Amino acid sequence: MKSGKLQLMVCIYAVLLFSCSQQQATESSLQFDAYQLPEARSISIAGNSNGELYLAYGMEHSLYVSRSIDAGRTFSDTVLATGNSQAHILPVEKPAIAVDDSNRVAVAWLELPPNFQGAGIWFAVSEDSGKTFNPPVLAATEDAGEVAMVQLAFDKDGHPLLAWINGSSLKFTRSFDGGRSFTEAERVGGGSCECCQPSIVVTPEDIFIAYRGLEAGGANGDIRDILLIHSNNGGESFEEPRRVSDTNWHIPACPIAGPSMVMNNGALFVAWMDGRFEPIGAFRRGDAWFASSNDGGKTFSTNVRINHDQDSHHTLPVIAIGPGGRIHVAWESLSQNGGANMLYYTSSDDNGTTFAPPEIVADNSDPSLGNPGKPVLFVDTLGNVTLAWLDRTGARLAIWNDPN
């Protein structure tokens, strides 16, 4: 593993069956073989319209990348992407990876000093489908503050954009030369929750960033709702934040759970966690939520709760869109009464108005595996759904086909 050499062999097959009359989580009808990545402490998935799938995962103080050209049945040997840089690796900080249709693959990461104040924000790109990576580029430097949760995307011309959190600020920089240099980092949006990962969507004309805000809530404490900012000029400026959440969530601490956002046919879809049903200022449990926008993020739909039960803490939902418009969502659920901890999956065929009964993908019934969590999700243009998650033994990966 330390040499960056690992042949991933995955044989996956699946059929999706739902019983829509049920109103509680069911045992999974998903059929797949899950591949294990030992020692992986964080994981992300990316792909492009050419059908290529890429895994990025953190081990020790480095990020590695592996590529599949057969819908995840096999993967190439892993390649060290971070060079000699000491990458900051945590399970809850998903590696930042982006792929464009010319098979350029990029990763971004943080390098933190011993006192965890300030950071270097690094970027590296591969021009040969992840076989090798160019030497890392220092995209930005933060001299002070707690820095976390870097995210990455490509624009239509293959230039990278980066967003991250420093203290209670959302920061942004971008490149106009393919990642050889970056603009001076700027604070964008309003206040930001200090350890919740943002999500970026880029179209040929627009940049959208969803993030968890941090606003003064008076006597009830801080408001940490999901917000969206939009730029129509390449990130030169951003409009005022728009609210995705339709109910304020007051909480005095960071929940360490940012939003997941995708776009399909001009519509934005966002999934996130909040604890709006808890007493103001308390945080015992939360729910997974969904909202959509059909007007470029100016307004969002009434929020829909994805999970059915309110007995567990549902958090870290991730979202992806199938080629037929089906919305796929996965999230982790932590029992509040000593019961089983779960990784759930569901889908929607009506643009998120309703969701199928959640299915159990993994649980903690095997003590050696621990709790499944920190899911990531990707669907390619042929409907191959890739779901990965972490447990005590590393990362696990499952792929099935869903043409919808």
Image (cartoon, rainbow, N blue to C red):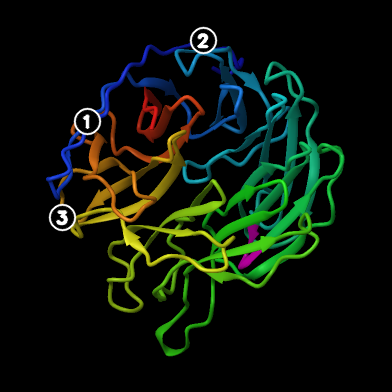
Q: Which amino acid does label 2 sit on?
A: Gln
Which numbered disc flags the more N-terminal residue, 1 or 2?
2
Measured as percent of width and height from the top left, residue 182 is found at 83, 47
Name the residue: 78% across, 58% down: 233
Q: Which residue lies furthest to the left in this view?
A: 22
Name the residue: 55% across, 60% down: 211
User: Which mark lies nearer to you, 3 or 2?
Assistant: 2
Q: Which residue is labeled 3 in the image?
A: 337
Measured as percent of width and height from the top left, residue 91 is found at 47, 41
Name the residue: 47% across, 66% down: 300
Q: SS class of the residue under badge 1? A: loop
Magenta region, residue range: 165-170
Q: Residue furthest bottom?
A: 219
Closer to the camera in the image, 285 or 30 = 30
User: Which mark lies nearer to you, 1 or 3?
Assistant: 1
Q: Which mark is residue 7?
A: 2
Work out how far the residue at label 1 is from the one at label 3, CA to CA, in angstroms. Answer: 30 Å
Which numbered disc flags the more N-terminal residue, 1 or 3?
1
Q: Residue 17 carries which label?
A: 1
Give the quadrant of residue 50: top right
Is residue 77 shown above or below 310? above
Closer to the camera in the image, 162 or 230 = 230
Q: What residue type is labelled 3?
A: Asn
Q: In this view, does 282 lie to the left or right of 56?
A: left
Q: Residues within 10 Å of mark 2 (few under 14, many from 20)?
A: few
